[in-house]
Image: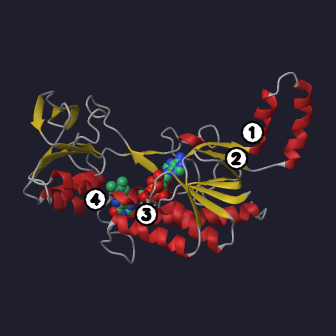
Amino acid sequence: MYDLVIIGSGPAGLSASIYAKRAGLNAVTLEQNPMSGGQVLNTYEVDNYPGLPGINGFDLGMKFREHADKLGCEFMEAAVQEIKTVEAARREANQKEEGKAEMKAASLPENRKMDSGFIVATDQEEIKTRTILAAMGATHAKLGVPGEEELTGMGVSYCATCDGAFFRGKVTAVVGGGDVAVEDAIFLARACEKVYLIHRRDELRAAAVLQKEVMSLPNVEILWDTVAKKIEGSDKVQALVLENVKTGENKVLAVDGVFVAVGIIPSGDILKGLVKQDENGYVLAGEDCMTSMSGVFAAGDIRKKKLRQVVTAVADGANAVTSVLEYLNGVK
Ligand SMILES: Cc1cc2nc3c(=O)[nH]c(=O)nc-3n(C[C@H](O)[C@H](O)[C@H](O)COP(=O)(O)OP(=O)(O)OC[C@H]3O[C@@H](n4cnc5c(N)ncnc54)[C@H](O)[C@@H]3O)c2cc1C
């Protein structure tokens, strides 16, 4: 049985792997993707991580993983599908046994004494562990308009850094108004003939420095008070249907690519019913990363907190392992 299973190898999970290894814990980090690094892999430049100004997001992710590998941290490529307490798993198994109702009731206290911890079911195997660190981060929110799903990978993208190069000399649109949307527009403007930034309000939410930069670019046009209604095209994106929310006026914009940057959704589905989450799915846990379930901890973007960044995710990873150690030593 592991002392700790870390789910996710983004900045939070990788920082936790490093701290767990150095603390002598028997820990494994599970990652559903072939590559570690999480969301940061999708950004061309991280300019706010101390000590590494202007580092490419992919390189930063690789550096975190190399550090963990150098220390000998254990990793497994596996997608976690379900988490159960050992007790709940035993109770379920007992309940499946037909015609043994009395035996079931009698065997439960015994099971409680024998086992504690969790069973983590993945697409590869089941793993038993004393504690869990949920570091599954977040994924891109969708626009939810006709054409989006059908044309994903055929001009609709959620990652300008990954797909921007396919649109060299072409016309693209970025939908959103936060940091990521503006960064995407700036990035695309380097290669695209023209970039439209589609924003539903009359001011951007992005950091002032990004706003200043995007507004200075001659090939970026911001369409204010505008929402995307539909993405058109048969086997590739050809147009974006827009609506002005103030006037109700519709217009069709000929574009080759649509980059969606309308926010993130926490990847917390596997925690439903296990720990308390807020209405958006963020796990309720304080700075000590302790959740409502004893033995389950949460770090990084999945946790309800004010600022979701690399620096806060790696800090969470370190704090979480400190709490795990206290829990395993019976302090908490
Ligand atoms: C385009 C973009 C630009 C950004 N730019 C910056 C920036 O400049 N500076 C900055 O500080 N921050 C930036 N951020 C935010 C930063 O990337 C995140 O705050 C940070 O990555 C969060 O780390 P995390 O480990 O909590 O989660 P994530 O990075 O989301 O990593 C979570 C990991 O968990 C894995 N996972 C999820 N579910 C499962 C499962 N069921 N089983 C196994 N594995 C699973 C995922 O595959 C992923 O690898 C940016 C984000 C984006 C999207």
Q: Residue under label 4, please give it.
A: 207
| Foreground disc of the pair 3, 2 | 2
Amino acid type of the residue tagged 4 in the rendering:
Ala
Between 161 and 182, the one lying in front of the other is 161
Q: Mark 3 vs ligand 1: CB under 8 Å?
A: yes
Q: Residue under label 1, please give it.
A: 89
Residue name at image x 44 percent, y 61 percent:
37
Q: Residue under label 2, please give it.
A: 119
Residue name at image x 13 percent, y 41 percent:
255
Q: Tell me the CA gap for discs 3 and 2.
A: 29 Å
Q: Secondary structure at mark 4?
A: loop
Question: Mark 4 vs mark 2: which is more N-terminal?
Answer: 2
Query: Are circles 3 and 2 on residues that touch, CB within 8 Å?
Result: no
Task: Return the x and y of residue 128 as percentages of the image width and height.
Answer: 71, 51
Q: Tell me the CA gap for discs 3 and 1.
A: 35 Å
Q: Is residue 303 visible?
A: no
Task: Return the x and y of residue 244 as percentages of the image width and height.
Answer: 16, 33
Q: Residue under label 3, please give it.
A: 310
Q: Quadrant of ligand 1?
A: bottom left
